Amino acid sequence: MTADARDPAALLQLSYAELSARADELRAAREGGTLARPALARKVALLSGSTTQYLARLLDLFLFESGIDAALYEAPYGSLVACVLDPDSELYRFQPDVTLLLPHARDLGPLPDVLAPADDVARSVERAAGAWVELWQTLLSRSHTQIVHANFELPLLRGLGNLEASLPFGPLAFVRALNAELARRRIPSVHLLDLEYLTSVFGLERAVDARNYYLSKQHFSFAFLPTLCLALARQVALHAGLARKCVALDLDGTLWGGTVGDDGVERLALGPDSAEGEAFQDFQRYLLRLKQRGVLLAVCSKNDPENARAPFERHPHMLLKLDDIACFVANWEDKAANVVRIAETLNIGLDSIVFVDNSAEERHRVRGALPAVHVLDLPEDPADYARALDAGAYFELAELSSEAAARTLSFTEERRRVETQRTFTDYDAYLRSLELRALVGPIGAADLPRVCELIKRTNQFNLRTVRHSEADLIRLLAEPENVGFQLSLSDRFGSYGIIGVVLLTKRGDALFIDTWLMSCRVLNKGVEQLVLGRMLREAAARGARRLLAEYRPSAKNGMVRGLYPRLGFRPLSEDETGSSYELSLADPPPALPHFIEEREAPPA
Amino acid sequence: MTDPTFAKLQQVFRQVFRAPSLELREEMTAADVRGWDSLKHVELMVAVESAFGVRFKTAEVASLENVGALLGKLRQKLAR
């Protein structure tokens, strides 16, 4: 078994052939006693109107990826009702924890006659539902099982055309009424699987396959089986206590468009002023609905805490408020460590968390470090965010009580612990796995537009926030006492483009760091260490004996307040305009480790 | 054997029956291949359909006697 998919939703990406191969591997591993991961043992009975062989093999795989090592009992074809009614049937000897009832349209029984009076139709709906209710009761009286009962998909064929929707005796109206009646008469320990919804979203025409039925008595198409298996596996997992409870959310690019630290609250894309802003707002609306039914919302953001909170407090179109967030974590640390912190604060398992982040790299990091957390493959377009989260059906619940809905409230009150420093011993391994490559070189004419944009717009990782104009920059770079360089970065996910700008100027025996700014996306990847190494070499090449540096606080650059001391600089002086530091070349700090392959950019 | 249809069909067989070294022969029948039962047969036909972009009629799926007959049907459909 491969270890990449630990949530069955990920299996939907695979073809039937691949799933089939994986299912075989799982069986072989189980027989050989070499299952890749521990899983809860559960007994699951499958009673279907179709042949179950295709479904059962796949279901086994979907269950295992849900954390369940299933013993499956498949009732013989055509014995769905008989094996429940017969007190001596195999079903009862098996003693299932969960029984899956999957009747299909051919088990509907006689449909009303054309032009049957409405009263007669209502009675036959009642009778049909009543037969299922009796079956549930019989099963429950003989077995301590949970029942998952799939309702009926809508009929594909419409002999009455559009009148099917209007006339009570048509098969369409009959199935709709029966599904509603089953929901109304549901009893405890019976849970309806909404096949009517599932087939309509998947496409009814693609979900059922008449030829398959004629050939092998399988009502559904092969293509639909994975979707059905995911829904069934979620139900079984739910009754094994394995449903997820919390969604951990990134902020910039996930809840709103833009970067709050750089763009400011006012310029975020959120709300009716832009198409993208509407999409972000709708995603928040969906999250709010999850929260109202008891899903915990947590924030996991790389940001200054004040910046991260600002939109919640004062953006006019922000639907989520701070009170909706059960645990709010915003800092510049490793996200995997922060997800662990969220789990601890909320006192839930890592396997209760779905991680939602628009950065492929953060997803890679969390997926690698915390396999129990489900990392959502977030689509690139915010218009698709809500559906991606919804389609995974991560937060199934058996019932909705007012207590469950109130759960988020108590978490909200308990939140906000003292922040503890927490490091991951395998962070280096993570950095190595990113395969970071840096190109460092002089600032050429072609680089000027991007470099000037960075100078103008970078607020957070900016040590002095000196906004040189393009003309100034060209003049400064032409003077022999100044040297500038720019740095671009790429990793296995792609290129970040130019992400750093440095301007150094000779002052007596020192080289002074006039400008050092970087995109905060690359923080904590070792780029600072790499840049420092480069500055030391530039200083040595110019006969300087030390580096001189200054941190000038601004409203937004709090994140680099402690940068120079952290890199080994010695404080010289401090006043209200800033702090000065130096680093002697005679006494350089040990080379700081980083995992970036550094290369010289070709001359522009 | 350089016939691309034959080679591609062999690939499908190898994948469906998880037999990476399976050598397809025209006279081969279900009895010659481990696991080729009536249920697997439908799975095989669906895999062949999706690999070649063709569709077999119900009766065709039910009546094919050996690999040669399947190849014949397949070539006939691909030629259209």
Image (cartoon, rainbow, N blue to C red):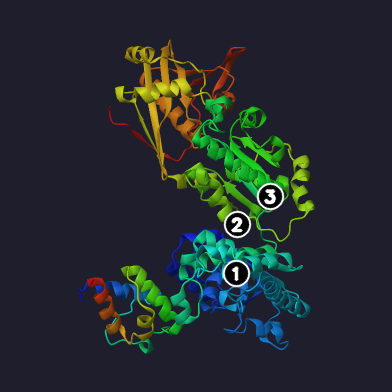
| Chain name for mark 1 | A
Q: Which sits earlier in the primary sequence, circle 2 or circle 1?
A: 1
Dot label at residue A295? 3
Quarter of the C terminus of chain A within the rendering: top left
Residue under circle 2? Answer: A393
Is mark 3 in CB contact (under 8 Å) with mark 1? no
Name the foreground residue: B20 vs A180: A180
Q: Position of residue A400 (x, y in %)?
A: 74, 56
Asked whether residue A266 appears in the rendered view, the answer is: yes
Residue under circle 1? Answer: A152
Q: Which sits earlier in the primary sequence, circle 3 or circle 1?
A: 1
Q: Residue furthest top?
A: A508
Q: CA distance from mark 2 to mark 1?
A: 20 Å
Name the foreground residue: A561 vs A176: A176
| Chain name for mark 2 | A
| Chain name for mark 3 | A
- In this rendering, position of residue A294 left or right of residue A269: right
Q: Position of residue A324 (x, y in %)?
A: 70, 40
Q: Position of residue A587 (x, y in %)?
A: 49, 24
Q: Which sits earlier in the primary sequence, circle 2 or circle 3?
A: 3
Q: Quadrant of residue A80?
A: bottom right
Q: How many marks?
A: 3
Say which amino acid is labelled 2.
Ala
Q: CA distance from mark 2 to mark 3?
A: 12 Å
Q: CA distance from mark 3 to mark 1?
A: 29 Å
Same chain for marks 3 and 1?
yes
Residue at disc 1, secondary structure: loop
Say which amino acid is labelled 3.
Val
- In this rendering, position of residue A122 left or right of residue A509: right
Q: Quadrant of residue A287?
A: top right
Q: Tell me if residue A127 comes above or below residue A492 in the rendering.
A: below
Residue at disc 3, secondary structure: loop
